[in-house]
Amino acid sequence: MKRLLALLLLLLAASAYARNITEKDLFKFNWIGDPQLSPDGSQVAFVRVTVDEKKDTYNTAIWAVAARSGAEPRRITNGPRDATPRWSRDGKLLAFTRSLDKDGKPQPSQVWVLRFDGGEPHVLTALPKAADSIAWSPSSNTIAFTAMTKPDDLVDKSAEKKKDDEHESDVRIINQAVYRANGAGYRDASRDTHIWTIDVPDALGSDEALPKPKQLTSGEFDERDVTWSPDGSQIYFTSNRVREAYFDRRDTDLYAIPAGGGEMKKVADIEGPIGSYAVSPDGKWIAFAGEINNPVHSYDQPDLWLVATAPGSAPRNLTASYDYDILSGVGGDQRAPRASGGGARPVWSDDGKTIYAVSAEEGRVNLKRIDAASGRIAAWTSGNHDIQSYSIRGGKTVALISTPAIIGDLYLVAGDGAMTRLTNINDKLMREVTLTEPEEIWYTSFDGKKIQTWVQKPPDFDAAKKYPLILNIHGGPHSAYGYTFDHEFQWMAAKGYVVLYPNPRGSTSYGQDFGNIIQYHYPGDDFKDLMAGVDAVVARGYIDPKKLCVTGGSGGGLLTDWVVTQTDRFAAAAAQRDIADWSTFWYVADFSQFQPSWFRKAPWEDPKDYVMRSPITYIDRVKTPLMLILGEADYRTPPMSGGEMMFRALKYRHIPTVMVRFPDESHELSRSGKPWHRIERLEHIVGWFDHWVMGVPKPEYEEGLRK
């Protein structure tokens, strides 16, 4: 009784000192990424990500924790840019990638190896371009990896002398429609990603020279995502071996090449792209994620496929009758930056009869068991959470799980789906702050469709009061909100706003038809879904209808622009990384729209369709004060096709508007941008809303304006 009373007093004392979460708590966040169980299931290696506030960047290091309750995680590498931990098949060695500094600049990541029973890590490669996608051979003496290094890069040119008048040009010659990528920058057409192998010496750290890597593939096409066959004779990979592939429907095939090099062969080909895959323990089958895109859709639901490794085998769709998103997930703003691990992969049971995979169903992500013979799907885990990553080895299963109140921690998953928490890496911070679970609501839209949404309320919510509302719209458009941690929503609620975040038509995790229904109608009826959600929450009586705000990024930025051209109900809006003019976007985005996925034809062939669906067309209707959040290195939604157009047009019309531009930031500003920029982004969005709905003075938005 005394023990129970002491615990109660401790909880009361803790709650008395709890505070609301702040935007700058991001500096204190710890993230877990890419968990990997050892072959015997006894240890979990993972990437731990922290913020270096002074350098305004992220540090990554490899940590490990025993796969049992009560174990304490321990750091096993120093960082600051270590990632991709991979166990040797015998469990004695751990390989990872590391990027070191030279002259204050990060250098290309290389392959490093350490003995797990002790000792310092040792570098294996010294290539001019980064090593990626590392995979151990079954014999544990060779590592396969991918890199963009060319043979000429390895030639010693130190003795060469340049002539005094020799000029090294920095001019780019571009002859392909897709020539740059968001985040990665401009593509070097002379470089492709190829497969390499390197032997791992028995005596790590000896004075001998580094082993020489061997290039297995070459040519003008990329090879990615390498995996060894169980007998070590083959290396599998994915590739699209078509020049200027953007002229065709999206496609990626599965190939194999002898481990010593030689002729590659195609293993699997479907009418669409092949994604993550796994080879069965006996080497006779491969399970893979694949999408059918014939006919061309706006959204193609992923399925789990099976193909025999024997020549001439035809792939079989195991989940054709399952109308949810296999090997997919939901979106949030707190996945581990710099340490994703490549996403969900299928995993085989030891007897080769069952395939394990996650699935996204109505905002929840859980593990499933799929019978390899019949395709029958059985639930393994359940709950309101997001399983972001998982590893299954040695009779153990570990999952990285996020919830609206947990950024992300590791859990052991039992055969019956029960979960045991392994880590609590944000325990100190979470004991300081008050977080609340969102309320899940289903409402009926204009045409009878049921729409799922969540409502994040202030920590001290009182239903008798009236609150300002923020409608927060997700991007994609084919993505989904769900039961995962969103710092943005928790912080906005802590600032006194009710946050409404719906999954309108076009969202994933609700079936193929629901996702694809917006093809050639985006934006459109999805706007009606959003407004029906606003009406449903306003009808509950705790929202002030004169204090409505709206924001969203990417596709949500487009919809924010669309909202303020279609209604005057909102007192303030903040469009992030938006699209204002579809025609301009078609010409300048980092990916091509040469296939009829969003539009049936090119802009000059059907200009009316582009005009009718572009927010800029209706700019004369806008009365709502609008903020534009833009990344200056955003190639996905370049500022010239979005915020810059809206800003100039609204200035002409004397509508209150500001641009907030973030130098060097890509389309990933809100998820993996520089920590200070992520914080300032939040401050500006809510600062704009505070100014227009709460009357908070914000001179930075008013300076220099004509009165």
Image (spheres, helix red, strand yellow):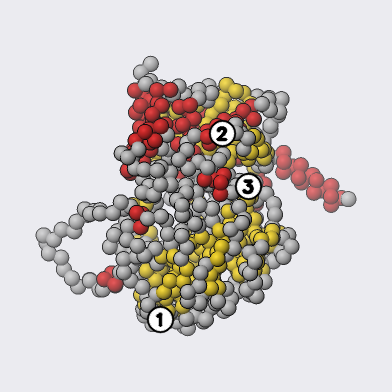
Q: Earlier in the sequence, mark 2 or mark 1?
A: 1
Residue 494's x, y, as percent? 61, 35
Q: Is residue 399 visible?
A: yes
| Secondary structure found at label 2 | helix
Alpha carbon separation for disc pair 2 and 3: 17 Å
Residue 103's x, y, as percent? 33, 59
Residue at 65% from the left image edge and 35% from the top image edge:
443
Residue 413's x, y, as percent? 69, 62
Please name the residue that numbered disc 1 is placed on.
Answer: 260
Q: Quadrant of residue 123?
A: bottom left
Q: Is residue 681 visible?
A: no
Alpha carbon separation for disc pair 1 and 3: 46 Å
Decide: is 409 above or below 130. Answer: above
Mark nearest the camera among 1 and 3 is 3
556 and 699: which one is in front? 556
Residue at 63% from the left image edge and 35% from the top image edge:
448
Where the C terminus falls, by quadrant? top left
Neighbourhood count class around disc 3 (C-alpha, 10 Å): few under 14, some 14–19, many 20 upward? many
Q: Quadrant of residue 654?
A: top left
Residue at 25% from the left image edge and 73% from the top image edge:
156
Residue at 49% from the left image edge and 80% from the top image edge:
232
Please name the residue that numbered disc 3 is placed on.
Answer: 362
Question: What amino acid is at disc 2?
Answer: Leu
Residue 69's x, y, as percent? 71, 63
Q: Do the CB atoms of the residues marked 2 and 3 lie less than 8 Å apart? A: no
Please name the residue that numbered disc 2 is placed on.
Answer: 530
Looking at the image, which residue sits at the far top?
707
600 and 275: which one is in front? 600
Alpha carbon separation for disc pair 2 and 1: 56 Å
